[in-house]
Every structure is written in structure tokens, then in C-alpha cells.
């Protein structure tokens, strides 16, 4: 199982000097112009690493190769494949979102069950060769190997830049590891062409990432003094925080169990070879290290300034969408904004194209605003379904009734369309998501378009509130560290009370009461029960932030992958209490005739059939837990071992 260096040269060398830069000079052109000057050649390196200015720009260029979690363009020759809107965001492979657009790769080859190792461009959810991973890795090593040649950098700055490069390398490995398992361990820029690079085992790959972060952390500040200008740069907090993420993934049953995830498989490139409880100890130690260093200093959860659900919602919004004190590490793209920014534009009402529609299963994971679990049958029997999203009218005022994070994650019926970024005050008309309503129109009836499930995604979208704004990708936030810590405590046999305290910190920030108080009927002393609550809390807090899909992967949730999902039909009623099955908007409709805003509806869950997922009827083959390496690479005969089942 080897990747021969001379095979990887086109990927690692031929493209490396195309690293984008933040600026250029008259004397030397950076970016694609570097391709004209013998990429990786001595002349180019002598120029770049003979100047502090050029070296800093080179590092800035490496930062531009980091993972950004939102599809934002469709010019595939100019962007990493995971950011291509024609591929899609892999969260829609989980149980919380569904994709109805037929031209998305995730719909065409994943939902249909036809994906294979013989894939072409725009078919794999995280392309092994086209995701800017190896470009970033080699660029990072080039900087590390040549930094001592730079004459006008202080030793302190050199150490910090090396540490930043190591963090980027480790992070890019982790981005890939969670899709493929063990990876080739690249420890230099490889000028030559004769070295063989074996595919690392899971253990070797994890140890390599952890080693890089341990080497880097002490040469980085915990936080930069000028976070306005240095936001997005790697810090000691980021390095230790990513260690927590890596151990969390590595210690989970996908790689750490009594048997490999694929029946009969034995390769240590896909698991540890057995269950190793000490891996969870490592995760716990990383979390403890983080909070020792933190000591209640700079990084803090965003807090509400009032006690209304809108205030808590605003605090949550600021936490995930701005580089405030909650954000530990973020990435961004600057060339796509406003109506040119396809993540926002393609989900806008004018396009209704690349929509990630939330499922009924996801919506029911969010509790009531006091933290008590939402239960459909209990609410139905109590006659409270009309209050499951909001109470009141635009004229009298709308009161939110559920976990404030729901309204930042999902567009629901009756929710006002705007929220002030300073006060949290809601305004504008309310979303009409009943069949035939102003917004939903025929989408739920046809199970197509933006509101196909009776809901629409709001995370990183926010309607007109986010039009024209740069969208940060929250690579790591403080709440995730709290939740990883809670999970590690439970997995290592620690105090469940301590684990619940960590979860309650996250709940309290959005006005929810504690887990124990809100769940008197649940045995939170049970490891399984408490883990399920932690995983539910993770998707409510980290929706669309790459959490749920990988939680289902690392816990091998075969049954969840096989379970059909649902949407919600909402019916407006006529004067006789009968369902209206035709177009029946209120705003832009009979409001003009003096009809009051409807607040009583009929509700019906419906199974999603457009497009059905292959797994729902044919079962979930465990091969899907990891992606296939491109068969064309395997067939070159240099020893790249395919993941089992592909």
C-alpha cells in the first residue's frame, strides 16, 4: 500500500506554486504566474525565501488552501471540488437534510447508490486529488524547509510561521482522514522522484497529525493581540482544539472497535486492529489540556444581552457566523459575496436551486424554548401543534416557542423574515410554508424546490439578513470543544454529572434549562442515553458545520442511514375547517381583503420520495463509511490500497 512519489509529482509539485497570494509586486508576479518559472525550482525558491515580504505572502497563499465547508461556485477549474455547487454539501447524506436537486453529485451517485471507485470529476463528495489537500501539504513543507533562508525575519516570527504551516498540514490531513482513513504520510516537499511513500495506517496517520500540532502549539500565541486583522490565523487554542477533534474521531467506533467496520477487512489503514480504550483517554487529556490553557481567558461563548428567545438566537448567530470570541478557527473566501456568492444566491427565493432542505426528523430534535424535549404525539394530543414554531401574528407580535437555534438552522412556518443584528428584534412578514402559501407555493406538494420538505435551510443563509456579507466557515468553535469534552468524559467512564455540566453550558447560552431538569424520564446515568443526548445536542448546536454526517459515520449508525426520512405538509383551513389544496397566500393574497393572518392549520408528516435514497430500500453497505480512492490511481500499480467494498 504505497503511493510512489513520482506518481504524486503532478499533484504535489506541478500545482504547488499556483498558491494564490493576497498581493503582488511589479518585480514578481505570484499566483498562476509562478507556473511559468519552473515550479519548485531553485530560482523561484531563491526569490520567495530571500524576502520576508514574499515569504509572508507565500504563507498567506497556503492559508487560502484550507478547507472551507460551503459550496460557493461552479467553475470547477478554479475551486476545490468540495466547494463546487454541482457536487453539494455532504450533510445531505445524513438524516437531517435532504437534497432534491437532480444535478447535484450527491443526488445523482450517492442517493442512487451508483457511486463507484471509477468516478469522474464532480462525483466524489471529497475528491482525493482535487480538494487542495496535497497542494497545501507540500506548500507547507516548502515553507518549513526554507524558512531559515529568509534573511529579514526574526527567529520568533520564523518559529511562528513554521507552526502555522504545521497546523495547516495537520488540519488538511484531518479533513481527508475523516473521509478515507489512513493516508500517505508526507514529511517533506520531495524534490526528488525516487522515494516511495507508503499509505499510513490509521494509527500512524493520527500520530502524525497529533505530532505536528504538538510541535506547533508552543510557538503560537493563545490568541493574537490584534484579532481584527489576525482573525483566521492559527493559534495555540486552534492547535489544541483540533487535537480534540482528531482524537474524538479516531477514538470512535468506526476505527476503534472489536471488529473493522467492513466485514472481513483486516488492513490497519481502516482501523486500529481492535478496541483501544486509551484512545478516549487521549481525547479526554486533549480537552483537559485545552481548558487548562484556556483558564477562562479570551475565548468565551457569545452571551445574550436579554432573556427573550430572539436575544438567545442573536447570540447563537454571532457565535457561528462572526469571528468573535467564540470562534477558535475559521476560514473564508473573499471573491464570492452577495449575489455572486452562490451558497447564498442559489438558496435564495429567486433561484430555489441548490437547496438543503431540513427533515422532520431534524426539526424534532430541537426542544421547546425552556429545554424540554419536543414530542409530536404529546403536542398533537394537547392541541399544541399550532404553537410548535411560534405564537401570535405579525400585527400583534410573534413569540418564538422552540430552542432559539432552530430558527437559525431552519426556516419554519410563521417565523418573521428579518432579525436585527444589533437588537435581535424580528420584523417583516412571516414565512408562509403551508401548501399554497406565499413562500412555499407548490414546493411541499411536489416535494421539490426550496421548501420541498415544508422547511428550508437557514444556517449560513439567514435570508436577506446575510445578503452581501462574507461568510466565515466555522472550522472550530468553543461549543464543539465543550461537547467533545462531555463525550470523552462519558466514554472514559467519568462522572456523568461532569459531562452534563459541559452540555448545560451550551444549553444555557440559548436559554435552555439543564438536561437533567428537562429530561426527568430519561436515565442519564446510562452511558447510551447520555451519549444520545450529547449527539442530539451536537446537531442542534453544530448543524451544517460538518458534525451530523461524521457523527453518523464515526458511530456507524447503519440503522439511521437506512431509515426513510420525512417532511411536513401544512394545510391552511377554510371557514369550515377543511384543507385548502389550491394556492392560498395570505400576504399578497387575501390579507388585502381584511382577512386576519391564519394561525390554525392541519399538519401531516409525509415520507420523502423525491429523491429516495438507495439505502432506504436496499440497506446500507458499510463500504459507504469511507470514500473510495480513485480507481485510476489504484490501477497505476504503485500500491495504493483501495478501501474495502469499492
Image (cartoon, rainbow, N blue to C red):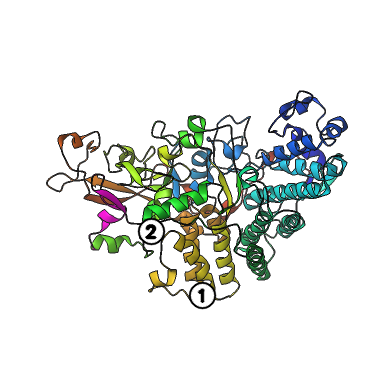
Q: Secondary structure at mark 2?
A: loop
Judge by depth and name the residue closer to the eye, 344 or 231: 231
Q: Is 394 colored magenta in this rendering?
A: yes
Q: Secondary structure at mark 1?
A: helix
Give the answer, above or below, for where 614 lies relative to 470: below
Decide which of 327, 585 is in the foreground and name it: 327
**Identity of the residue drawn at 42% across and 35% down:** 348
Vertical relation: 64 (above or below) 293? above
Residue beneath label 2, please?
307
Q: Residue at x 28, y 37 (%)?
A: 438
Mark 1 sits on what residue? Answer: 497
| Quadrant in the rendering for residue 149 | top right
Q: Residue at x 45, y 48 (%)?
A: 97
Q: How far, Cα to Cα, is label 2 from label 1? A: 26 Å
| Crowd rating for badge 1 (residues with CA inside 10 Å; few <14, some 14–19, many 20+) | some
For the magenta stretch, what is the residue range?
382-402
Labels 2 and 1 touching (C-beta < 8 A): no
Query: Is 376 included in the stretch rendered in magenta?
Result: no
Amino acid at each position: 500500500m504505497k503511493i510512489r512519489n513520482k506518481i504524486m509529482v503532478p499533484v504535489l509539485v506541478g500545482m504547488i506554486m499556483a498558491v494564490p497570494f493576497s498581493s503582488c509586486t511589479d518585480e514578481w508576479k505570484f499566483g498562476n504566474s509562478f507556473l511559468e518559472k519552473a515550479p519548485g525550482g531553485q530560482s523561484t525558491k531563491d526569490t520567495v525565501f530571500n524576502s520576508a515580504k514574499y515569504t509572508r505572502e507565500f504563507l498567506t497563499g497556503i492559508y487560502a488552501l484550507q478547507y472551507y465547508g460551503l459550496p460557493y461556485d461552479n467553475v470547477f477549474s478554479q475551486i476545490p471540488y468540495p466547494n463546487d455547487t454541482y457536487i453539494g454539501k455532504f450533510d445531505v447524506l445524513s438524516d437531517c437534510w435532504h437534497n432534491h436537486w437532480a444535478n447535484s453529485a450527491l443526488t445523482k451517485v450517492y442517493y442512487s447508490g451508483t457511486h463507484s471507485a471509477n468516478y469522474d470529476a464532480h462525483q466524489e463528495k471529497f475528491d482525493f486529488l482535487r480538494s487542495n489537500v496535497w497542494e497545501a501539504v507540500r506548500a507547507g513543507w516548502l515553507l518549513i524547509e526554507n524558512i531559515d533562508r529568509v534573511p529579514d525575519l526574526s527567529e520568533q516570527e520564523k518559529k511562528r510561521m513554521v507552526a502555522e504551516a504545521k497546523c495547516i498540514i495537520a488540519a488538511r490531513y484531518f479533513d481527508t482522514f475523516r473521509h478515507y482513513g489512513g493516508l500517505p504520510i508526507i514529511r517533506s516537499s520531495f524534490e526528488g522522484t525516487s522515494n516511495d511513500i507508503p499509505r499510513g495506517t490509521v494509527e500512524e496517520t493520527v500520530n502524525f497529525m497529533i505530532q505536528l500540532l504538538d510541535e506547533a502549539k508552543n510557538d503560537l500565541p493563545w490568541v493574537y493581540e490584534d484579532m481584527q486583522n489576525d482573525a483566521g490565523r492559527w493559534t495555540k487554542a486552534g492547535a489544541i482544539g483540533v487535537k480534540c477533534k482528531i482524537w474524538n474521531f479516531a477514538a470512535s467506533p468506526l476505527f476503534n472497535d472489536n471488529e473493522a467496520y467492513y466485514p472481513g477487512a483486516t488492513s490497519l489503514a481502516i482501523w486500529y486492529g481492535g478496541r483501544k480504550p486509551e484512545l478516549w483517554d487521549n481525547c479526554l487529556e486533549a480537552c483537559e489540556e485545552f481548558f487548562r490553557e484556556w483558564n477562562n481567558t479570551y475565548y468565551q461563548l457569545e452571551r445574550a444581552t436579554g432573556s427573550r428567545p430572539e436575544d438567545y438566537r442573536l447570540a447563537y448567530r454571532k457565535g457561528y457566523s462572526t469571528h468573535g470570541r467564540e470562534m477558535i478557527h475559521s476560514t473564508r473566501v473573499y471573491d464570492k459575496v452577495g449575489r455572486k456568492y452562490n451558497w447564498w444566491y442559489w438558496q435564495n427565493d429567486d433561484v430555489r436551486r441548490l437547496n438543503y432542505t431540513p427533515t422532520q426528523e431534524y426539526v424534532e430534535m430541537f426542544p421547546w424554548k425552556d429545554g424540554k424535549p419536543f414530542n409530536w404525539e404529546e403536542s398533537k394530543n394537547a392541541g399544541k401543534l399550532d404553537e410548535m414554531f411560534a405564537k401570535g401574528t405579525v400585527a400583534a407580535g410573534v413569540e418564538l416557542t422552540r430552542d432559539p437555534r432552530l430558527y437559525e438552522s431552519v426556516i419554519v412556518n410563521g417565523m418573521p423574515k428579518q432579525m436585527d443584528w444589533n437588537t435581535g428584534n424580528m420584523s417583516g412578514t412571516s414565512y408562509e410554508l403551508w401548501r399554497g402559501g406565499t413562500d412555499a407555493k407548490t414546493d411541499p406538494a411536489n416535494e421539490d424546490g426550496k421548501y420541498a420538505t415544508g422547511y428550508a435551510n437557514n444556517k449560513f443563509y439567514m435570508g436577506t439578513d446575510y445578503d452581501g456579507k462574507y461568510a466565515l466557515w466555522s472550522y472550530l468553535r468553543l461549543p464543539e470543544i465543550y461537547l467533545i469534552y462531555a463525550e470523552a468524559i462519558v466514554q472514559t467512564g467519568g462522572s456523568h454529572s461532569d459531562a452534563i455540566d459541559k452540555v448545560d453550558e451550551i444549553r444555557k447560552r440559548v436559554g435552555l434549562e439543564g438536561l437533567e431538569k428537562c429530561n426527568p424520564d430519561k436515565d442519564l446515568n446510562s452511558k447510551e442515553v447520555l451519549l444520545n443526548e450529547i449527539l442530539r445536542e451536537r446537531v442542534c448546536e453544530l448543524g451544517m458545520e460538518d458534525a451530523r454526517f461524521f457523527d453518523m459515520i464515526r458511530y456507524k449508525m447503519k440503522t439511521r442511514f437506512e431509515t426513510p426520512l420525512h417532511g411536513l405538509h401544512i394545510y391552511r383551513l377554510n371557514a369550515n375547517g377543511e384543507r385548502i389544496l389550491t394556492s392560498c397566500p395570505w400576504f399578497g393574497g387575501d390579507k388585502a381583503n381584511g382577512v386576519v393572518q391564519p394561525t390554525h392549520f392541519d399538519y401531516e408528516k409525509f415520507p420523502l420520495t423525491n429523491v429516495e435514497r438507495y439505502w432506504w430500500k436496499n440497506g446500507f453497505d458499510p463500504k459507504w463509511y469511507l470514500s473510495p480512492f480513485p480507481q485510476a490511481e489504484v490501477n497505476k500499480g504503485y500500491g495504493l490500497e483501495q478501501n474495502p467494498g469499492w
